Amino acid sequence: MIRHIVFFTARDPADLGRIVEGLELLGQIPHSEHFEVVQNSKVDQFGNDVDVIVYAEFADEAALAAYKAHPIYAEATRRVRPLREIRYAADFKALEKKAFRRSA
């Protein structure tokens, strides 16, 4: 499974709703197994720069590539790019679930 996480900051906080709306279009793309767009709750004591997060899960790299190649992806990018300041993305293979013990 591939996890896809993207962080956005808004140029203008007044545009947060429009950013979320534009990113929610991505949920219509059929290649993800799980998809969310959320505003950052901004409760971290050290940094709250991120405004909006996209989180999605894909069966494999081919599904992620198909998602990024979909026309809706291009439309969401067209809508959101002028409203956002920063975009950070990370794609990674999910670790297998392993039992672990926390040290005391």
Image (spheres, rainbow, N blue to C red):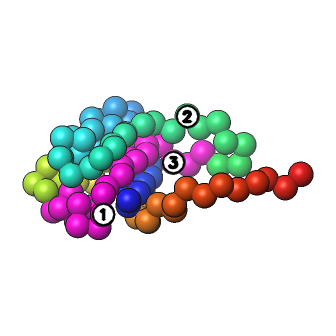
Is residue 103 placed above or below 20 in the rendered structure?
below
Quadrant in the picture for residue 34: top left
Q: How many neighbours does mark 2 have within 10 angstroms: few (below 14), some (14-19), or many (20 or more)?
A: few
List x then y, in percent, for residue 52: 43, 43
Helix, strand or loop status at disc 1: loop
Which quarter shows the N terminus? bottom left
Helix, strand or loop status at disc 3: loop
Q: Which mark is residue 50?
A: 3
In this image, 87 relative to 23: left or right? right
The image shows a total of numbered marks equal to: 3
Viewer-closest of 39 and 64: 64
Furthest residue to the right?
A: 104
Instruction: Choose mark 3 or mark 1, whichever is in front.
Output: 1
Q: How many neighbours does mark 3 have within 10 angstroms: few (below 14), some (14-19), or many (20 or more)?
A: some
Viewer-closest of 84 and 65: 65
Amino acid of disc 3? Val
List x then y, in percent, for residue 89: 41, 61
- The residue sitting at 28% across, 43% down in the picture is 23
The residue carrying mark 1 is 60
- Is 52 covered by the magenta stretch? yes
List x then y, in percent, for residue 2: 38, 61
The residue carrying mark 2 is 41
> Along the polypeptide, which appears first: circle 3 or circle 1?
3
In this image, 46 relative to 57: left or right? right
Question: What's the CA distance linking mark 3 and mark 2?
Answer: 9 Å
Which segment is the magenta one?
48-69
